[in-house]
Amino acid sequence: MKRLAKWRLVSLFAILALALSGCSGKPYLSALRPAGEVADIQFDLMKLSTYIMVGVIVVVMVIFVIVFFRFRRKKGDNGIPKQVEGNHLLEILWTVIPILLLLILAVPTVAATFKLADVKEMDKKNSDALVINVRSHLYWWDFEYPGQKIVTSQDLVVPTNEKVYFNLKSMDVKHSFWIPAVGGKLDTNTDNINKFWLVFDQKRANEAGNLFYGKCAELCGPSHALMDFKVKAMNRDDFDTWVKDMQAVKEPEKATSDLASQGQEIFNKSCIGCHAVTPQNKMPDTARVAPNLTNFGERSRIAGILDHNKEELKNWIKNPETYKPGNEMSGKYPEMTDQQLDALAEYLMGLKVQD
Ligand code: HEC
Ligand SMILES: [Cu+2]
């Protein structure tokens, strides 16, 4: 019997350890390791409300314990104790204290809400603020840089230590744009544009390996949990270079080897109807039906989730349904032989804009 109780305790601690390890605060993924001005503000609000809640619990528990022991029935107590009803001082106290606590919570929260929604700068004429149009799709992300006239998908590229402004919109159902370490989450809706800004801190980006993880935070379908994107944060100079390299691609890049040009041929026959390989957006939003692959060779993941290598790429093209159930690519192109898959992988991995 005793042994059983001991094991119960051990397994309880094991489960607890497992649960708490989820809070370890990975720098690329955790809201508890804020990596920018917005994340800092949000984290401070979380701390403030946690402190207040813990304070209330502690005070209530202390009073509870005192009352529990002091007013127990003791030997010699007979009958019903004196009945007290209505105490002005107490009633005023327990009305005023919660009001004060709510005010302490509300004032910084409302102030932060307005600050985080302040996008005057992006709406100004001739403003030189960096604006990115985020378009969410079942189950992938499109990023358009209207000022730079380029489009990329799945990997969001941003400069660090400056305000980056976002226009958020969804092309199918509601999704939500969230970069846990940096800020959000804000819904992407179908019939209005939500706007906000974020700052990506350079030092924290270094700690995170210059790659933050982004998530869809609104249940949107069977592959919702797989609707990931990544954020490449780099200093302004590197960002400008990346933009120039993207802009320099005016037409589909020529494959460099025999195998790759075979792949390009297959791609031009079966895939290019959905996937663009030039970064200029010549289509209306609604016509963009698949990730832009101009810089696919430089992605950090395939489809946001798989390791970026030829094997996984072939697996993906062979059967995307296994990896992302309900995705919009499955079954919409002819089946490929192993040889064709090799060629496609060779071609796609070669799609790079930077050297
Ligand atoms: C009907 C349109 C359509 C066709 C045709 C199509 N795809 Fe896709 N493809 C998609 C969509 C949509 C996604 C995004 C899937 C997701 O992540 O949910 C995608 C994703 C991908 C990805 C991952 C992209 C990234 O940025 O990580 C690759 C690679 C890819 N497709 C290759 C191909 C190849 C190769 C072909 C031709 C054999 C092809 N696709 C044909 C619609 C299409
Ligand atoms: Cu989603």
Image (cartoon, rainbow, N blue to C red):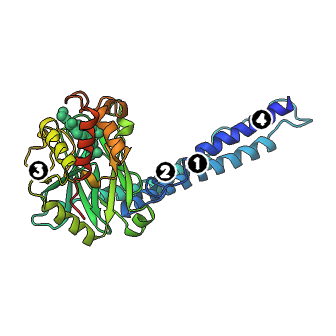
Residue reaching furthest right? 76
Q: Of the numbered discs in the image, which one, if any, rests on residue 99?
A: 2
Q: Position of residue 99 (x, y in %)?
A: 49, 50
Instruction: Estimate how packed mark 3 is, as few (under 14), some (14 to 19) or many (20 or more) residues with alpha carbons within 10 Å.
Output: some
Q: Earlier in the sequence, mark 2 or mark 3?
A: 2
Q: Earlier in the sequence, mark 4 or mark 1?
A: 4
- Residue that mark 4 sits on: 7
- Residue that mark 1 sits on: 21
Pair 4/3: label in front: 3
Q: Determine contact: label 4, label 3, CB under 8 Å.
A: no
Q: Secondary structure at mark 4?
A: helix
Amino acid found under the numbered disc labelled 2 = Ile
Q: Position of residue 313 (x, y in %)?
A: 32, 42
- Relative to 22, say whether 225 is above or below: above
Q: Earlier in the sequence, mark 2 or mark 1?
A: 1
Q: Secondary structure at mark 3?
A: loop
